[in-house]
Amino acid sequence: MQLSRFWGYWFLLPLYPYSQRPTLCREIVPQRIWVFEQLQGILYAVVPLRMTVVALEEGGLLVYAPVAPTQECLALLQKLIDRYGDIRHIVLPTTSGLEHKVYVPAFRRRFPQAQLWLAPGQWSFPINLPSSWLGLRGEVIREGGTPWGREFDHALLQIDLGRGNFAEVAIYHQPSRTLLLTDLVIAFSLEPPEILTVDPFPLLFHSRDRAADIPTDTPENRRKGWHRIALFATYFRPAAVEALSVWETVKQALAAPDRSPRNYFGLYPFRWQYNWEESFYHLWGGGRPIVAPILQELILPQAPYAVQHWLDRVCQWDFTQIIPCHLKAPIAATAKDLRQAFANSNLPPSDTKFVTELEAFLVARGIAKPRPKA
Ligand SMILES: [Fe+2]
């Protein structure tokens, strides 16, 4: 265990890598924008989780979507603070992305001088507590104005989901022509993200074709594992994977060479079809931005006019790259690419079938609202 990577509040959102969180800092725009990347996932389907830091023209830093403030993360951040000044603004840009909310109170406590900015309509589940009870005391972000200086513009998307709301704050950094987003857009790289290579075990876990395989740590196996993780993270139940029966899974586990707890006692309930990689290449699509199927199917259809309004507003900005809070960053993309992403994901219906079924399931049980009639 590395003390500098210890995160004691892991139980608030008990996802891999639990209490051991490596952080990687990458400079995206020289002397202006950096990303701090950690990991999150279940069953070793692990994806990057990202905080973005911008050096302000007037001095100091703006932090978009904080990650876990481990000692390692804080030490990396201190290098920027020493050079560019204190953190002046912390932005929580979402209401529904628990993985972005959960670190804010602890992060804020480390930087009490900073102003905390909250996407409007914060809520909690199963009990809707006031924001202040959740440790989220800050200024609510409104449309208009220049709360973070004239170098920024921002646009709010708010969607009423019935039992809560979805909100995301897009920020445009004009000097670097960079668009900061949270969950609305993702893209994939062919190679595993660097933060996943700090400990490649999840990549190798998913590179196997059966429980008995002992994968060697090669670039090919890391890439194979990454492509499968990308499919799980996007579709939850990819069409190209078959779930084995309990009996078959246990039988294979008993014959597996590694039955350690870390290897889930040898349990590996997946059988990938021979052509599974085609699904990944559809998803990758040259690294283009897409709207994640869960948002495209479940969330955005709830408010098509609000989405269109937000998109029109964001597409007035002359950005050349997008930094989202997950997966690939930066994504080389213009307003035209963003419009394309929202118009059509070009993902095969067979791959998005599970998400479509999930929507029907949630609507039937009154958990999600039916789509408004056009
Ligand atoms: Fe997210």
Image (spheres, rainbow, N blue to C red):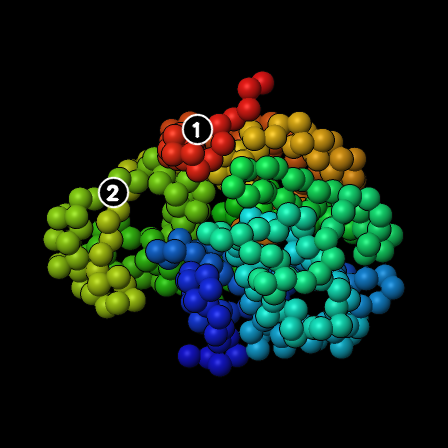
> Taking the image as drawn, is residue 1 in sight?
yes
- Crowd around label 1: few <14 · some 14–19 · many ≥20 (10 Å): few
Q: With respect to residue 56, does 273 lie above or below? A: above
Q: Is mark 2 within 8 Å of ligand 1?
A: no
User: Which quadrant: the C terminus?
Assistant: top right
First reached walking from the N terminus: tag 2 or tag 1: 2
Report the residue at 71% width, 42% height from top. 156
User: Mark 2 = which residue?
Assistant: 243
Q: Is mark 1 within 8 Å of ligand 1?
A: no
Report the residue at 39% width, 43% height from top. 236
Amino acid type of the residue tagged 1 in the rendering: Pro
User: Mark 1 = which residue?
Assistant: 348
3D distance between C-alphas at marks 2 and 1: 20 Å
The image shows residue 22 at horizontal and vertical percentages of 51, 69
Report the residue at 62% width, 58% height from top. 131
Report the residue at 79% width, 72% height from top. 85
In depth, the one of 54 and 363 nearer the eye is 363
Q: Residue furthest top?
A: 374
- Crowd around label 2: few <14 · some 14–19 · many ≥20 (10 Å): few
Amino acid type of the residue tagged 2 in the rendering: Ala
Q: Is residue 303 left or right of residue 62?
A: left
The image shows residue 15 at horizontal and vertical percentages of 42, 60
The image shows residue 82 at horizontal and vertical percentages of 76, 77
Residue 202 marker: none
Q: Is residue 258 left or right of residue 292?
A: left
